[in-house]
């Protein structure tokens, strides 16, 4: 497929870069607060900006650093192991590497999301809120619990 090793390497680097940008872009794009408006504090329906909560957790920074290190190592491994492979073998190895990286990402983020969910439940229970939606799914109303969830998770 790629006759020149330099082109193959550039393609591999570009694919990894797109993958990284996709991951971080998703986190950034989800930080918008949407069109939700607060209806007051007496509502038993709450809303939380999960993306904002996620961005403010120190755990996310550590997970990103770990994932960046995994990506760098995967790139090195890919370059070293695919030097003498055919295009088909390279593609198969690339697919395996991407699956491994996706599993690693899930492994790193799952405990963080579980921690956020537990904090949301705790804050909702303390405020007597029966239902909590993500802020991007609320058009109008709902008690905003975002600041309280961030405070519970970070102590700030």
Image (cartoon, rainbow, N blue to C red):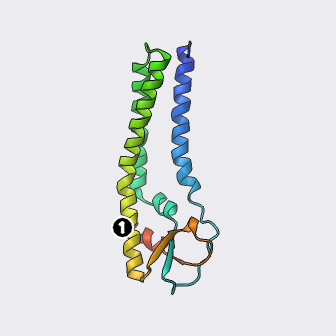
What residue lies at 56% left-to-right and 31% top-to-bottom?
14
Decide which of 123, 56 is in the foreground and name it.
123
Examine the rendering and report whether any part of residue 134 can be seen. Answer: yes
Instruction: Looking at this view, name the residue that lies furthest to the bottom.
Output: 42
Residue at image mark 1: 118
User: x, y percentage for residue 26?
Assistant: 55, 50
Decide which of 67, 117 is in the foreground and name it.
117
What residue lies at 51% left-to-right and 46% top-to-bottom?
23
What residue lies at 56% left-to-right and 59% top-to-bottom?
31
Examine the rendering and report whether any part of residue 155 can be seen. Answer: no
Q: Is residue 93 above or below residue 28?
A: above
- Residue 36, quarter of picture: bottom right
What residue lies at 44% left-to-right and 29% top-to-bottom?
75
Decide which of 10, 35 is in the foreground and name it.
35
User: x, y percentage for residue 149?
Assistant: 43, 70
Within 10 Å of disc 1 (Cα), the crowding (few <14, some 14-19, many 20+) is: some
Image check: 80 left or right of 139? Answer: left
Instruction: Looking at this view, name the residue that lies furthest to the right.
Output: 35
Q: Is residue 38 above or below residue 103?
A: below
Secondary structure at numbered mark 1:
helix
Q: Quadrant of the C terminus?
A: bottom left
User: x, y percentage for residue 87?
Assistant: 50, 17
Image check: 69 left or right of 6? Answer: left
């Amino acid at each position: 497929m790629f006759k020149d090793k330099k082109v193959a390497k550039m393609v591999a680097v570009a694919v990894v870069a797109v993958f990284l940008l996709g991951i971080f872009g998703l986190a950034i794009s989800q930080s918008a607060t949407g069109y939700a408006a607060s209806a007051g504090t007496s509502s038993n329906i709450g809303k939380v900006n999960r993306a904002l909560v996620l961005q403010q957790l120190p755990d996310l920074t550590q997970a990103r650093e770990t994932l960046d290190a995994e990506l760098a190592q995967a790139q090195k491994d890919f370059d070293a192991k695919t030097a003498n492979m055919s295009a088909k073998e390279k593609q198969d190895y690339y697919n395996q590497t991407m699956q491994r990286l996706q599993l690693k990402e899930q492994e790193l983020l799952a405990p963080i999301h579980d921690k956020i969910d537990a904090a949301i439940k705790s804050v909702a229970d303390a405020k007597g809120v029966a239902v909590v939606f993500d802020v991007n799914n609320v058009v109008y109303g709902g008690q905003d619990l975002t600041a309280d969830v961030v405070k519970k998770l970070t102590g700030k």
